[in-house]
Image (cartoon, rainbow, N blue to C red):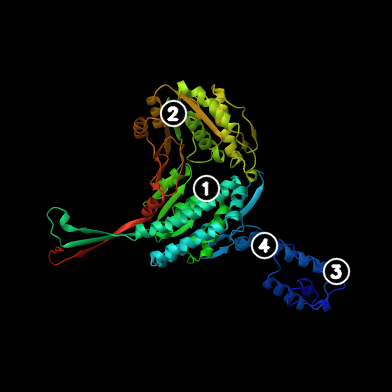
Amino acid sequence: MAHLALRAVWPSSPLYNPARHHPVSSPAPPHPLVHPLSQKLRLFVARSALLRNEPVSVEEEKRALEAVVVKESAMAEWGVFADIIDEDQVFKYYTDGEWKKSASGETVSIVNPTTRMTQYKVQACTQEEVNKVMEAAKAAQKQWARTPLWKRAELLHKAAEILKENKDPIAECLVKEIAKPAKDAVTEVVRSGDLLSYTAEEGVRVLGEGKLLLSDSFPGNERNKYCLSSKIPLGVVLAIPPFNYPVNLAVSKIGPALIAGNSLVLKPPTQGAVAALHMVHCFHLAGFPKGLISCITGKGSEIGDFMTIHPGVNCISFTGGDTGIAISKKAGMIPLQMELGGKDACIVLEDADLDLVATNIVQGGYSYSGQRCTAVKVVLIMESVADEFVEKAKAKMAKLSVGTPEENCDITPVISESSANFIEGLVMDAKEKGATFCQEYKREGNLIWPLLLDHVLPDMRIAWEEPFGPVLPVMRISSVEEAIHHCNASNFGLQGSVFTKDINKAIMIGDAIESGTIQINSAPARGPDHFPFQGLKESGIGSQGIVNSINMMTKIKSTVINLPSPSYSMG
């Protein structure tokens, strides 16, 4: 009667009784990588067996035992993250302090860019579930706004610590979801923890100071009014990060929102969603209040627009592409923080250090296969030094490793087949119009070998469009004015670079370029994370960077004290 119970526990269990075993060999002890059965599961299996009146066959015992061990193995595999995945290996969404399955019963598949096979599945949430998330976020924010600054900072520090402690499993998700090289994946997670800690410290300083204005500083007034102003939260912040930095660019939105007293709803990208869910669980483990942080996954066609125009959203922080323009047109009267990509140009003058130029441009153009908003997108180089630069760049490119992210290769598969097809379209257009190929164009699936295109002309698509891949165009110029004109004719204005030994000339060129940031003698880059980061034209709205994000996610509230008669301090 109780045979199943006896066969489903290890000898170390208090339920174990060798005298009542079947006369067959005992089960082997658990594999060292598999945790022993949890007490809860042991009791469940034992109780189920004791309720039975008929003997249990050895085969039935075996199947039951294997089922429990499989489940326990999955729990062992995911460790502290076991709660975020269900019995069907579908990742749950997070709301009101709990990990939940969607009522839709549907899932969204995440394809591994390297294998081009489904790697993970996440919940396909419904609009009604979005409504519930927004309600929970609104209620939680009211209480969070009353939480002292030091306490908010304390929780952020705790989340940062947990995030860094779990860098390896989160990095593994980045490797499988977005083909980020393993070493860079770990760096992203650690950097994100550091960003959270810095945000906590900076937030206490920025938000801990108010401002006092005295009325007699304006002509015609006596000192009978004291105006006290401070920063207060906006309410519910909707954060939408991109696939290429699904953890870091999520944290860059979450940290400022929370320290400022807001609640946060995260809509992660499909590619990168599982890494983001792992990251959110670190906030859960840190002990943030229920409902304050939510992470909802699903189909953009079902919940995308619904979330961005939801009346419960008080602010949107978005990083991505053209979708941001559509969001900005629909969002209404709420603050927006948008970073929408760029066509970052490097201008190289005759006196530039070409070894420095080649190092920066190869690293800046090809790291993470060029899938960065601040990757070098076009080189504008004076004709007199172009040949020498191209040779130096080719030599450095020959040393780039190409392969899988697990092998820490420099060049890994781009995010999707459609992205690879788009990049190939730009390459073929350049070929048809006469560009010089410095290497043979090679592609296998989503993996594209690094390519430098010389003698690119303005009529080629790649002179203007953002490839988001390991292909870099070189345009030869005859004057500084020609370079400035090309930069300013672009629809983008995120970053640019100037390479020269003449600092005066570099600053003058930088001032003339319509771009959010100009790098002098370095490739474009986002960071360190406390630096301001912004784009002009179609590259974005507003400014990022820790302090700028905190300020953007707050508003000013003033209290005016009216005195019956003027009062002046005499010291």
Disc 4 crowd, CA 10 A, few/some/many (<14, 14-19, 20+): some
Q: Residues within 10 Å of mark 3 (few under 14, many from 20)?
A: few
Determine whether label 2 and label 1 are within 8 Å by CB.
no
Question: Disc 1, disc 3: CB below 8 Å?
Answer: no
Compute the Cα span from label 1 to label 4. Answer: 27 Å
Q: Amino acid at mark 2?
A: Ala
Asked whether residue 269 appears in the rendered view, the answer is no
Residue 524: x and y in percent read 45, 38
- Given residues 166 and 541, the one toward you in this image is 166
Q: Amino acid at mark 1?
A: Tyr
Q: Look at mark 4 in the image and give the residue it sits on.
A: 76
Q: In the rendered view, would you say 494 is above or below 292? A: above
Q: Amino acid at mark 4?
A: Ala
Residue to which mark 2 is pinned: 352
Give the position of the N terminus as an image quadrant. bottom right
Secondary structure at badge 1 equals: loop
Nearest to the observer: residue 283 or residue 361: 361
Q: Earlier in the sequence, mark 4 or mark 2?
A: 4
